[in-house]
Amino acid sequence: MKKRIAVLPGDGIGKEVTRGAVDVLKAIGERFGHQFYFSYGKIGGSAVDSFGTPLPDETVELCRESDAVLLGAVGGPKYDQLPVHLRPERGLLKIRKELGLYANLRPTLYYSSLAESSPLRKEIIEDVDMVMVRELTGGLYFGKPSERSTQNGQDVVVDTLFYQREEMTRVIKLAFDLARQRKGKVTSVDKANVLESSRMWREVAEEVSKAYPDVTLEHVLVDNAAMQLIKNPRKFDVVVTENMFGDILSDEASVLTGSLGMLPSASLSEKGPYLYEPIHGSAPDIEGQNVANPLASILSAAMMLRLSFGLEEEAKAVENAVNEVLNAGYRTKDISSFGKKQVSTTEMIEEVKATI
Ligand code: ATP
Ligand code: MG
């Protein structure tokens, strides 16, 4: 198989961990006989430094010509004083819009070898295996108006939660398709007892579910979902929800695994290319020290193999290699514990490559 991959390392540890994903993809290409071609582009602060904008047109072009996009992370203290339109995070929001990435998938998986890095008891998190599907391009974060004004001498403020029915349908469908390949259960999260948008969301979920008799649908109110995630996380398979609820719940779910450094994500569009990135940020506090955990980025590459290229066996090979390396006791600083072998970013990458 021949594929073109756009690589956007970005800022901070983004550069360090992305190298891991690229190296691992190369190793997979060698072992399974695929040709992966990598082209590099700039985004975020490093793009501001070279091009005076956090997302140059060249980068958008590069992504559009590629079969998949691998992103590191953007941002850093150096750029905090810039005007809003030049902030690195703008680059990220813009690339999501440009590529039409409407669904963000975050798997949360239990690693027995990492049970001690979670603040939750092993009996609760054991065997957790869920995917959160968050709507990414609508809702409260994009609705207009979003502004302040003064009415009768009082400061007032408005944000708008806006969705088209079709925007709900496509992301909920995607969740059902995903559930079909997994444990066959969709949990739709809303606040239908209060919000009109949630009543429509629930209606759409019911409608979509008619075409999936083999998938079970349950509705959970968002406040209850927040509690269930911690009390009874094993009950979830695929969770689907709107933008803001998903933003909050997916961070909460990440605690089940242990470290930010372990969690991959994929953002999907209607026609592709899809974008893959670790959920962590640029971590300026550890930049350049060769201590960052590259596994979230490496696991994002596994998601790319599976979702963009349909290479299930190759994806499994990456995930198994990560498991083996963890079981053998190798740990980067963020997941290290007594009696384990603490390794650097580059050593961890080498271990995974060697295992593949
Ligand atoms: P952003 O706004 O870009 O999301 P942030 O400050 O919210 O940034 P991160 O950059 O993800 O969050 O960093 C949060 C903490 O987690 C930092 O202390 C960082 O060092 C640590 N961290 C993040 N990613 C990793 C990683 N891959 N390996 C080790 N530690 C990490
Ligand atoms: Mg953050």
Image (cartoon, helix red, strand yellow):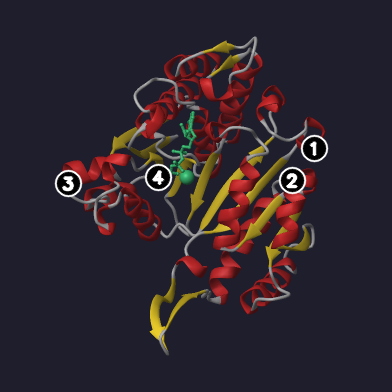
The Cα–Cα distance between marks 2 and 4, rounded to whole angstroms, is: 37 Å
Q: Residues within 10 Å of mark 3 (few under 14, many from 20)?
A: some
- Residue at horizontal 78%, vertical 30%? 122
Q: In the rendered image, which quarter contains the N terminus?
A: top left
Amino acid beneath label 3 = Phe
* Residue 67: image tag: 4
Foreground: 75 or 219? 75
User: Is residue 6 rendered to the left or right of residue 198?
Assistant: left
Residue 43 shows in the view: no
- Residue at horizontal 73%, vertical 66%? 209
Viewer-nearest of labels 4 and 1?
1
Q: Determine which residue is flagged by label 3.
A: 51
Q: Label 3's element?
A: helix
Residue 194 falls in which quadrant of the image? bottom right
Q: In this view, does 159 lie above or below 328?
A: below
- Residue at horizontal 60%, vertical 28%? 319
Quick one: label 2 or label 3, which is nearer the N terminus?
3
Q: Determine which residue is flagged by label 2.
A: 230
Amino acid beneath label 2 = Ile
The Cα–Cα distance between marks 4 and 3, rounded to whole angstroms, is: 25 Å
The Cα–Cα distance between marks 3 and 1, rounded to whole angstroms, is: 48 Å
The Cα–Cα distance between marks 4 and 1, rounded to whole angstroms, is: 39 Å
Amino acid beneath label 1 = Ile
Quick one: label 2 or label 4, which is nearer the N terminus?
4
Amino acid beneath label 4 = Asp
Viewer-nearest of labels 2 and 3?
2
Q: Determine which residue is flagged by label 1.
A: 124
Quick one: label 4 or label 3, which is nearer the N terminus?
3
